[in-house]
Amino acid sequence: METFADYILNEQDLASKIEIIYYLSKKVNIAFDKSVVFKFEIMRLFLNYSKIEVDKNLVLTACLLCNCKKINNAQDIEKIHTYAKRGAEYLSTLGFGKKFCKICEEVNRYSNSNPREKESDILELVDQFGGMLLDRPERIGFKPDEALVLLEHRNLKDYYNRYLNTFIDFVNFIENVKINSIVEMTALRRLVKIYNETEDLAKYIKKVVYEFEPTVDKLINEQEEEIANKIFNGETDPNRPLFSEETTKKIMNHINNTAITEASNIN
């Protein structure tokens, strides 16, 4: 008998995959909101950029479901520490295998699961970085360069993530992809703007899937062609620093001078 896990994993169309989870969330008590779709799109872009040798379908499905038991109450530390493990346990009841559930459990480090799956390192990066870009009750969203510095020097300061440098390269690349609307802005900031301006989840999904994705994919292809031509003609500088000295200094001062609670690390 086909399980829900079989059904969602066999669905290769990403828009349909999101739609399936959307309707599942209305039937059962799982967390699924705009932030999940927002992070899913960052994941899609990162996997396309990085060409990491993983099962993309598996990772993208995990991105939609790994936070299925996440709570909004940042004061409930016990549930914050256990939601990923509880989510993995719930997903096992839907027919997902041990590896998939382990990947989802390792979206954060609270369960101390070790050794970590390589797919979990990807989930961790996207989950934390994506969360920092969005506004929260206690703070406004960080700019992408600020979020990267915090990701490396605060959130992952004491942990090894095998894809961190690749992810930094990706954000540096995508920040050079400009989208023209009324005002030109980078792709990530445009994605944040759509998030902030679209309250309804169903409408947000449509805007991301049918408007943002075709536009950004076309621009990325053009950007990659331009970079390839510059490399071929010897016009690029491989020693150019990723961040300006001013940006790094500002963010490191923020880290050193601000008391950051454990709850504020949860995105």
Image: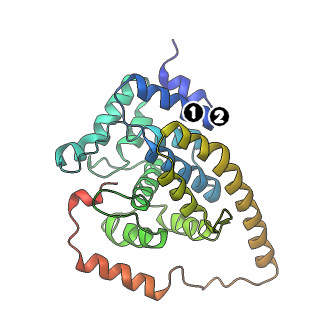
- In this rendering, position of residue 37 left or right of residue 48: left
Q: Quadrant of residue 138?
A: bottom left
Q: Tag 1's secondary structure?
A: helix
- In this rendering, position of residue 74 left or right of residue 132: left
Q: Is residue 263 above or below residue 150?
A: above
Closest to the observer: 162 or 167?
Answer: 167
Task: Name which residue lies at 43% across and 41% down.
Answer: 33
Closest to the observer: 237 or 183?
Answer: 183
**At which x and y percent is residue 158?**
30, 67
Q: Is residue 189 above or below residue 91?
A: below
Closest to the observer: 87 or 16?
Answer: 16
Q: Is residue 124 above or below residue 140?
A: above
Which residue in the protein does label 2 denote?
A: 13
Q: Residues within 10 Å of mark 2 (few under 14, many from 20)?
A: few
Q: Residues within 10 Å of mark 1 (few under 14, many from 20)?
A: some
Task: Name which residue lies at 64% across and 33% down.
Answer: 12
The mark tally for this picture is 2
Direction bottom: furthest residue:
245
**At which x and y percent is residue 80?**
24, 46
Label pair 2/1, CB-CB below 8 angstroms: yes
The amino acid pointed to by label 2 is Asp
Q: Is residue 52 visible?
A: no
Q: CA distance from mark 2 to mark 1?
A: 6 Å
- In this rendering, position of residue 132 left or right of residue 56: left
Task: Name which residue lies at 41% across and 67% down.
Answer: 142
**At which x and y percent is residue 18?**
54, 35
Q: How is the image coloured?
A: rainbow
Closest to the observer: 181 or 115?
Answer: 181
The amino acid pointed to by label 1 is Lys
Q: Tag 2's secondary structure?
A: loop
Task: Name which residue lies at 42% across and 53% down.
Answer: 127
Which residue in the protein does label 1 denote?
A: 17
